Amino acid sequence: MLQLKQAKAAIDSTGDQRTFHWKMAPELRLKAGTGMRTLEKARRCEEDGEEGGRGHSWTTNRSSRTARSEEDRDGLWDAWGPWSECSRTCGGGASYSLRRCLSSKSCEGRNIRYRTCSNVDCPPEAGDFRAQQCSAHNDVKHHGQFYEWLPVSNDPDNPCSLKCQAKGTTLVVELAPKVLDGTRCYTESLDMCISGLCQIVGCDHQLGSTIKEDNCGVCNGDGSTCRLVRGQYKSQLSATKLDDTVVAIPYGSRHIRLILKGPDHLYLETKTLQGAKGENSLSSTGTFLVDNSSVDFQKFPDKEILRMTGPLTADFIVKIHNSGPADSTVQFIFYQPIIHRWRETDFFPCSATCGGGYQLTSAECYDLRSNRVVADQYCQYYPENIKPKPKLQECNLDPCPASDGYKQIMPYDLYHPLPRWEATPWTACSSSCGGGIQSRAVSCVEEDIQGHVTSVEEWKCMYTPKMPIVQPCNIFDCPKWLAQEWSPCTVTCGQGLRYRVVLCIDHRGMHTGGCSPKTKPHIKEECVIPTPCYKPKEKLPVEAKLPWYKQAQELEEGAAVSEEPSFIPEAWSACTVTCGVGTQVRMVRCQVLLSFSQSVADLPVDECEGPKPASQRACYAGPCHGEVPALNPEETDGLLGGLQDFDELYDWEYEGFTKCSESCGGGVQEAVVSCLNKQTREPADENLCVTSRRPPRLLKSCSLDPCPARWEIGRWSPCSLTCGVGLQTRDVFCSHLLSREMNETIILADELCRQPKPSTVQACNRFNCPPAWYPAQWQPCSRTCGGGIQKREVLCKQRMADGSFLELPETFCSASKLASQQACKKDDCPSEWLLSDWTECSTSCGEGTQTRSAICRKVLKTGVSAIVNSSLCPPLPFSSSIRPCMLATCARPGRPSTKHSPHIEATRKIYIQTRRQRKLHFVVGGFAYLLPKTAVVLRCPTRRFRKPLITWEKDGQHLISSAHVTVAPFGYLKIHRLKPSDAGIYTCSAGPAREHFVIKLIGGNRKLVARPLSLRSEEEALAVRKASPKEALQPHKHQNGIFSNGSKAEKRGPAADPGSRYDDLVSRLLEQGGWPGELLASWEVQDSTERNTSSEEDQNAEQALWHLPFTMVTEQKRLDDILRNLSQQPEELRDVYSKHLVAQLAQEIFRSHLEHQDMLLKPSERRGPPVAIPPHKHVSGFSSSLRTSAAGEAGGGSRRPHRKPTILRKISAAQQLSASEVVTHLGQTVALASGTLSVLLHCEAIGNPRPTISWARNGEEVQFSDRILLQPDDSLQILAPVEADVGFYTCNATNALGYDSVSIAVTLAGKPLVKTSRGTVINTEEPAITVDVGSTIKTVQGVNVTINCQVAGVPEAEVTWFRNKSKLGSPPHGHEGSLLLTDVSPSDQGLYSCRAANVHGELTENTQLLILDPPQVPTQLEDIRALLSATGPNLPSVLTSPLGAQLVLDPGNSALLGCPIKGHPTPNITWFHGDQPVATVPGLTHHILAAGQILQVANLSGGSQGEFSCLAQNEAGMLVQKASLVIQDYWWSVDRLATCSASCGNRGVQQPRLRCLLNSTEVNPTHCAGKVRPAVQPVACNRRDCPSRWMVTSWSACTRSCGGGVQTRRVTCQKLKASGISTPVSNDLCTQLAKRPVDTQACNQQLCVEWAFSSWGQCNGPCIGPHLAVQHRQVFCQTRDGITLPSEQCSALPRPVSTQNCWSEACSVHWRVSLWSLCTATCGNYGFQARRVECVHARTNKAVPEHLCSWGPRPANWQRCNITPCENMECRDTTRYCEKVKQLKLCQLSQFKSRCCGTCGKA
């Protein structure tokens, strides 16, 4: 049973005044009771709070209250209390929190607040919460009778009253006005009753929330996780089929409603996910639980209604049972969950192991029922499922380790590519001009990790827009014929010809081809001149004497003078010959038209732009036929007629121009010359035209526009890795060719070239590396010295093709494993003391000693310990070998001797602190009147007593060390910062000897601070109780005589404090005007400072400026005398007399203090500790007395010994003459106010010779002006100070012996000020350096660096140090805020910032610390060796070294010299040959590469020999390394004769042997290949008859090709003579010398084999095409006898085929598709449509298995449609990594471009 967390303790019935009690378990009753009382109390307060929150002040647990918020404070409410227990343990309850009104008036707002809790579903057996509340009244009588109460829910008028109905009756009673908090208002709602009111609760279980579940049951969902299923079923039942399925409703469905109309009956079948089946007959109306799903069923005579809210916990099958003759209909509606949903995967592995990479997510299809991943097709079935787009994020952002040598930054696509669109090239344009179209195919492809590309469904690429598949092309106009003007008629009378030029002009106005010959206008026509001719026989028009083409040429070349300078050609001269080929010349001038005078002026040629027209050309004057006789006109006509007959029909003509040789940047076109038939205008064979009349070659320039920008692409670099996945890069830049003639090219911005830009990076060597050993970093050494070991992990790993590492078992790595352990710290440890245990105490009682022995030992580098001489160990303190011990006190028989008793050396003085100090030291025995927050060290010097045994008391109580008070074992006590509770009497005890020290505190008004009363009275009572009776009787007398028997002044009051006898005097001394005015002024300033400063830290602001103590000291005896004098005076005069005595005392104390200061200054040549006084009012007497003494010193300088300058640190320095004028001495801080008109800075110095004074501000000499003046006494005066005058002013006093300087700070209104220097300090030698903050430090390692941060401000500024903007935890502070860095190393490098802050503001100054590393040879040389091999893989190379190296080379060779170097900053490298820089050596061909690290010397000769050196230098030092090059030469040497080439006969010769030598050593002859060989002659040898020998011929062919045959040869015995003739001799002569060779042998022994095969099998293989299948047969190897052999035996023979295509009826199949469905969207990227695709038989048209159609590509059954942008599509970024994508130039990758549309669009 669920616990009721709250309940009413009693329910009063209006009808019956008896009490109803709960009937529950005891613990429940108790809980309900207390909870109810608390809640009732809270509610009463709530009602009060609503009325105004008056009159109640109940308490809550203070510790549990949170700090009050701003609005709480404003409203005078206390903080909210803790939340109460939840009213329910499940099903959604309520919890409340209370607060109270702190005001006597009303508070606005409520004093109670609620929240929901226990929002977990209750178990089914728990029952209804409202029903539980009703049943709680079952054992309470109502009107004298017991009832069983049932809840009445969903009351529309008052849903939050507890109304219950008596079971079995109509009696409804309101048993309580309010249900318990957390009860649901209505059964079907989450709204809950709180304090009797119905409160809205959203599906997120939050009060006041209006968030609702969607139809799918998702809180605040959009309904996308389910789909509405609506339909109608009509029964078609028969006598044979009584049952039928209406609809299957799957697991998880919601809001199910079915209505059956008709006589039939519904029933249910269920099946759980575990496979358990069930059935419910739905026999009656009611609500049932079927497989944990609630089913509401209503049965009417003519219809049935079935409702299920869901979600269903099983699959429900709704069935119908035939119950009558008529048909029934069932309407159903429900929300079915989409059980296959996309979900985002985790991120793939990072694209880079370090240095910043990227990683992507993908999406997978997930089955919500089985909780497993399924094929993507399941999710594609639901159009509502939108596949998530991949996400991109950065990863592995840590920098790569330096040893990597290569930083991998790679877009993820290089080896985990997303699916992408891929397009085929565009087809040719459908029209060459006038507008056509071209198309291409676009498909979605996916690339796997091995680089294989496969085609996939288009939806996978839909995260980016699909590329267009059609585009217009060649939209320019087609070329047209353009006819120019006619030439003049060729004759002056009668009928002639005229010509014109006709060109084919394209849309750019260029001569081109492509015009239709049929539409070409004619270029020649007849013309008639009206003047009659007197020529008798004219049959045809006469040809022009000058051919028409020359006129056309003239037309083209004609030029008019213009106002721009241009070339103007004159007419051509006559041809130089009368026949054949000659030349013509003309003048070409550069001319300009002068517009004002309309005259033409000649200019120099270089004033005209463009090409100058030709001034000479070839000309053709017709054929030469020997001597041409002088002819009369008639003969001429006859000759012309004959020529016309010869070439009447065919003639040459220009036919336009060729295509321009270049498309841009300037090209050339040549006129096309054709031989045409004059009558038909058809082209003819060129042989038919007269060759000599062929027109000259005609060229013209074209395409003069500059070329458009285009990508210039460099070669790929070598791969960065040999395996795994490396990178190759190349240069790609956008260039623009201006002119081809000048070869002018300019580089442009990438945006100006056609996008996309070709990729500049690509993956390479993308395959797995072999396994190898990968060591981790060495762990720290196990010991700091004396020989330790260090370990590391060495793993066998394999770098995979995706860049990741795979860890493998060690057996996979074949190379020997790297060492995983090594020795370290192999040096001796420093000597150290080994101490034994303490001995027993030397005495059995009282005080004794204990000792222990010490041995000096040293741990050697071998790890062995050795005992060494004790002088090698550091000095051992005495206390470490002997110590006191104290046992029980010895029994003393008699009084001890006094001369050996302990003694405390006390000092009887009185100290009055007048200036803030950080720390003061005192000796016991006196009185100290001190300022708060001073640290006090109190010493107790003893004789004849061990200091560790000293004990301390305060006011009679034993003192032990605490955070505030330290009791040190060496006889002193330290109080860290005085506070009022520290005032009191401190007692030091050394055995029987005791001494006291009294501490009192001075308050801010120069009055003594009273101790806290309660504390004081308790301590005094304790002190009196502890004191001996004698001391108790005499409270004012102290045994050591510190307190006398006193005066009447002491005896005021009944309980005078024994330590307050001088309080009255000291108070008067502090209050009255007896001090010199300077002191009073200083105290006034101090008081104001104390009053105005809130934090403890700011109190220290003054001390930073006033370095010396100002504590007044006087003897106790002097005050005792004054007290005695006062006690002897009559009462009425005592006040007057005390003022006089106190003033006199003040003068004495002050004078003795000044004398003490003067003593400090005079004798020392070193700087004395300066005395600092804050600015205060000027008192002339005191100031002038100081000046006089200073002047006196200066005046008497001649009689004095020589001394260095010393600047006087004045005691009383700063005077404020008025609000507008400030006068001060050095060592102070001046705060400029808005009314300050003048500042006077004094500087007085002593020394002999007299010092010279100079002033500097912030380290720079002060520039004096009419506002900044140097006064005659060397004071510096600033008139009308401005903000620019703020800074540290330093007075420098200099003489021949030295100098002294002191600073004074001038701040603006007390704002912080930092003393800085702006410079760079470079240190390579000093062991320690000190600089002011603000400068840059460059130093070598191991140096101690101090950075001073002298600050000023009023109040004093607090200094905080930062390194690289991070606060230093506990910096090793030096003096006054300086920062000490010891033994600096590269890890200390960085930006150090000093921040000075006070109440007026803050100021930060920075110092950059750079660690210099002098040039040195690196320990690892792999990098430079790799650099050398990369620079010249096949060139000889040598590394320089400090000791020198040598390389021997051939002449003419090239060599690489490497200079291995490391240092910081990177050293500059200079190369020398001998003592000269290489750049100045004549005849030395060299290149300096890799930032100077490599010198390449080419074409070496004898002059290049010698020593080369590289000088590496940086700010930290320099290093010289050397290497020598030695040139060697090769030559041929003639040596002894070689062995004879024959032992007999006439062919033996001996060749003299040539050897290739290098420095007398034989080398490979190829080295001498270029050298001249010496002429050598062979020598004849062994010219004699040879002995007889067998001679054989070649073998004959084999008699058989297989199965074994025979081959033969001829064998004879021959003898070779010295003459060279060979003669046959008897076989016996040869047999004696050698065995006769065989003349017959077997051959081709292998078996005779052949391929055999079986008959073809049935045609039933897989379908490979329409009607085509595959059939098989067996093919095997056998002998001719039929013995089967392995196939290899027949491998030499061609093998017959074993498969062939065959005709199959079963393969008469094809794909059949239905029409596409309507598109799901009208625009955007996500519209789709589907169709049915099935494999059908051609004859039967029935569907068959799809694999039969697999020979043809399956048509798509799904496609995107209406992919057009919707209106108002905005281009925006959809990921936060877009700036990074743009930086890495990934915008050209389509998937990044679409995700980062906004950012990439701006690129």
Image: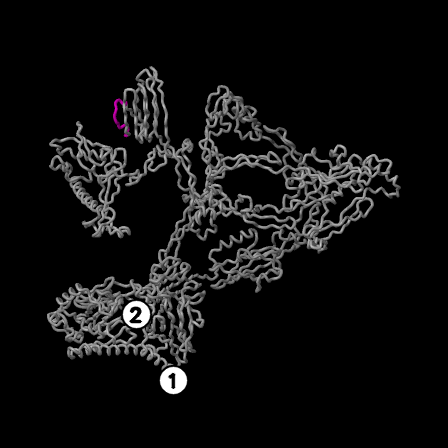
Q: Does residue 713 appear left or right of residue 273 in this picture?
A: right
- Place residue 521 in its image quadrant: top right
**First to last magenta residue range:** 281-292
Give x and y (percent) for residue 777.
40, 52
Image height of 1045 relative to 1577, above or below: below
Give x and y (percent) for residue 822.
40, 54
Rendered image: mark on residue 1199: 1
The kind of residue on which mark 1 rests is Arg
- Place residue 1023 in its image quadrant: bottom left
Q: Find out whether residue 282 is within the magenta segment.
A: yes
The kind of residue on which mark 2 rests is Val
Image depth: mark 1 or mark 2 in front: 2
Q: Does residue 395 appear left or right of residue 589 in this picture?
A: left
Which secondary structure, mark 2? helix
Residue toward you, 510 or 1301: 510
Give x and y (percent) for residue 1496.
57, 56
Q: Which residue is mark 2?
A: 1085
Crowd class of label 2 (few under 14; some 14 to 19; many from 20; radius 10 Å) = some
